[in-house]
Every structure is written in C-alpha cells, then in structure tokens.
Amino acid sequence: MIELDTLFENLTRPVADAQQDVLYSAISIPGYEPHRLAKDHEGAPALLIATRGAPRQYSATRISLEHLQVLHNAECVISGEHGLRETGRFSIVRCATSDTLIQRHFLRMLVGVLGVLGQEPSPEEVSRAINNLVELFRVMVEPARKTVQGFWAELLVIASSTEPILLLDAWHTTPHDVYDFNSGHQRLEVKSARGRQRQHHFALTQLTPPEGARVIIASMLVEPAGAGVSIADLLGEIRTRINVRPDLLIRLEQIVYATLGETWRRAFEMQFDRELAQQSLKFFDAAKIPAVSLAFPASVSDVHFKSDLSNIPSLPKQSLRSAGELFLAALPR
C-alpha cells in the first residue's frame, strides 16, 4: 500500500509567489506517475490529478466544503524534485485545513481514490472519484447514526474474519439497513452487550426475515479498556487485508464516516477489550431468539425489544461452515 503520509512529510513547503496563482511542491506518485502528491504554501496536502485527453476542453469548476476544495482544469505551477519547475493542467483536490489529523485521514482516503482512477482516467472517471471524496467530507459533519460500541463490534467481526472482502461486499449500504450484512438469502446481524450479560436490543423486523432468508446473529460482550483496541486500529487491519480492492477501500471509508458522522474524532480514540469480545463471540439462529408475539394490531409498527440470549444454544462452527458463504466468511481466523 502506498505510504502517502511519508511522501507528503518529505515534501518541502513552497514559498508563496505573488506572480503565480497556484504553486505547489509536488512529487509523482509511485504506480500513478501522471498524478502528483502536493503541498501548497500553507502546508496543506493536495492531489493533482492528470486526466486523459485534452483538459482545456473542460471548464474549470470549483467545489468548496469546510475541509475540502476541488478545482477542475486548473493550471498549476509545480516545484518538483531538484527544484525544477513545470506548468500543467490538473484537477486539484485540496485538504483545506491545518488540522493534521484531518490531513492524515485525507491522505489515507486518497489511496483508494488513486486505485480507482489508475494512471490515465477520463474526466468522467475523475469526476466520479472526486464526488465520492466530496461525499466523505460532507458526512463527516453530520450526526452519528450508530453507537461507537455497536460499530466497533461490526468492524471487529470484519477484521477477525476469514474473508473480509466478502463481508465488505455484503456490508450495509447505509447505517439504517435492517441487517449489518446481506448476501443473497443470507443475513448477518452483529449485536454487542456491555458487561457480562448477553442481552441485546432487536427490531422485530430483524427476527422476521423475508421468506427463504436465513438470519444469524453474531453476539459479543464488549467492555471499554484503557489499553484496548480502537476503531482506528481495526480500520488499519482491515485496510491492509483489502488493499487489492481499491473500490472497497473507498466503500470502507464511506460507511465509517456515514455512520460516525461528527463523532468520528472521539470515536477513533475510544478503546475496547478485544480479547473479551473475541472470546465471547457466539453465533445464534435468529429463529431461536425469544421475540414478542406477532399478534398485535396492524396499525402498530417499528417494534423494538430486548432479548436475553444467555440460555439459547449457540450455533457450532461446523453448522456455520455449511450455512452459506457469508456465515463462513464471518468465522474468526
């Protein structure tokens, strides 16, 4: 995986030139040489994307968010290696903040973007990739859609799984999906409980799937731990295992920030006991879990309840291996 952080740190900060509108210190990116990783005179990171074809045929359009700026078809003056200067037209994606943590997240996101773009993207491909990045920065300031504990548990299942790529392909499109993982007729829902009692909250819809669908619940016990594992740690593990799929790197970031929203900074710092969670991980057939009766008025909807799984027999590993590829993939390594 490209170490953009190291490349960026080694770039010198250019001196502002009153005669030039856009001046960058930049370096070609290994494996993606037409594109440049750049640092501007304010010390902010930027990606300069070279497009296939004739850039002058495309108008210069600008996007501006709180921490992200995009300018297409811009003429840039670049101070490259050995002090050589050149001028070229690029799509500029700039991290518009001095916050070093956001800058590091920006550089990490670019790894997936570059993998999708390749060396010679068309203007349309550039536009799609940048739109994905813009959406990532947009959802970073929205309200959180799940608890940190619950989301940490989902990531632990992926990080510990035998087939993280298969799980990521099946991961929920939005945090509000009924099930965490959905593949064909197979549904997997991850539940976590604080403390040592295996009690979980359910929506009735989670335990009453469509006809022909099989639902399995992955249940674990979770406790905060000062020297535990954070969401940031789990994400690092997952990225390493899926780096052959740059589209999944982008999808991973999209789901993370869409779920955590404005709480992402605090969420990345919270740590939980990984050993307890992994040792307590059990799988249950949703059909065996105690649920409320379906005999209620048709006008009643959105039914939620808490159920205790302490006395419910869990599914043996052999049963999961034969239940379907999604359930097999979720088994810990």
Image (spheres, rainbow, N blue to C red):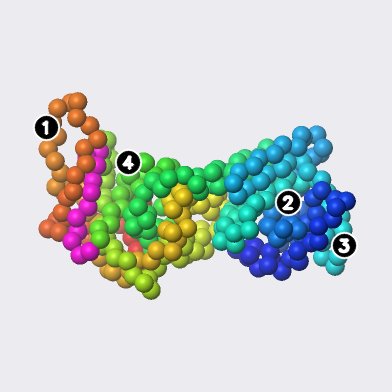
Measure how far apart labels 1 and 2 are at the Cα level. 61 Å
Q: Which mark is residue 48?
A: 2
Residue at left 28%, top 57%?
192
Q: Which badge, 4 or 1, is on the more N-terminal residue?
A: 4
* Mark 2 nearby-residue class (10 Å; few <14, some 14–19, many ≥20): many
Say whether disc 4 or disc 2 marks the residue closer to the N-terminus: 2
Q: In the rendered view of the protein, which quadrant contains the N terminus? A: bottom right
Which of marks 2 and 1 precedes in the sequence? 2
Kind of residue indicated by mark 1: Ala
Query: Considering only order in the chain, which callout, 1 or 3, is on the residue closer to the N terminus?
Result: 3
Q: Is residue 271 visible?
A: yes
Q: Which residues are magenta?
A: 195-205
Q: Secondary structure at mark 1?
A: loop
- Could you tell me the amino acid type at mark 4? Val
At 51% across and 52% down in the image, what residue appears? 253
Tell me what residue is drawn at x 60 percent, y 55 percent: 106
Q: Which mark is residue 178?
A: 4
Asked if labels 2 and 4 touch by Cβ distance under 8 angstroms, the answer is no
Mark sitting earlier along the chain (3/4): 3
For mark 4, give the secondary structure: loop
Distance from Cα at disc 4 to Cα at disc 1:
21 Å
User: Which corner quadrant of the image does residue 234 belong to?
Assistant: bottom left
| Disc 1 target residue | 295
The answer to whether residue 158 is visible is no
Task: Find residue 84 and name its label.
Answer: 3
